[in-house]
Amino acid sequence: MTSLRSPGSGLQHIAVGSVETDRQLTDTTRLMYSADMAAFTAWCASIGRRPLPANPETVN
């Protein structure tokens, strides 16, 4: 699992595949995942929803 920190919600663990796949992630990929999580968290906050665990209505 890759650990991503989303603003204001503490450490979140996002499964990105097998342990071997996780080891192969580049720093750039990890940075992009973190940026995506920050954007998703901000969007959720703007509409009054929690990012994780996300409700199905949030991700539809």
Image (spheres, rainbow, N blue to C red):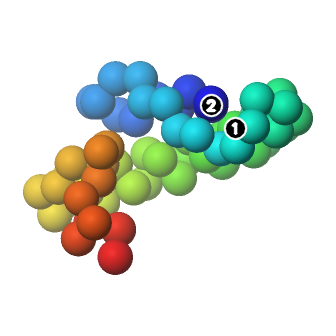
Front residue of 35 and 14: 14
Q: Is residue 30 above or below residue 48?
A: above
Residue 28 visible, this angle: yes
Coordinates of residue 49 in the picture (x, y in percent): 17, 55
**Quick one: 38 or 13, which is closer to the camera?**
13
Which label is found at residue 30?
Answer: 1
Horizontal side, residue 31 vs residue 19: left or right: left
- Please name whichever residue, 47 or 59, is drawn nearer the observer in this view of the structure: 59
Could you tell me residue 58's position as x and y percent?
27, 66
Say what amino acid the circle numbered 2 marks: Thr
Query: Which sits earlier in the primary sequence, circle 1 or circle 2?
Result: 2
Q: Is residue 27 visible?
A: no
Q: Look at 27% across and 30% down and name the residue there.
A: 8
Judged by depth in the image, the label closer to the viewer, 1 or 2, is 2
Q: Secondary structure at mark 1?
A: helix
Could you say whether the residue bearing mark 2 is in a helix, strand or loop?
Answer: strand
**Residue sitting at 40 percent across and 35 percent down?**
6
Q: In x, y percent, where is residue 4?
A: 52, 32
Amino acid tagged 1: Arg
Task: Name the outermost residue toward the bottom.
Answer: 60
Residue under pointer 2:
2
Residue 40 is drawn in which quadrant?
A: bottom left
Residue 36's place in the image compared with 28, above or below, is below
Residue 51 placement, left or right of 20: left
Q: Quadrant of the N terminus?
A: top right
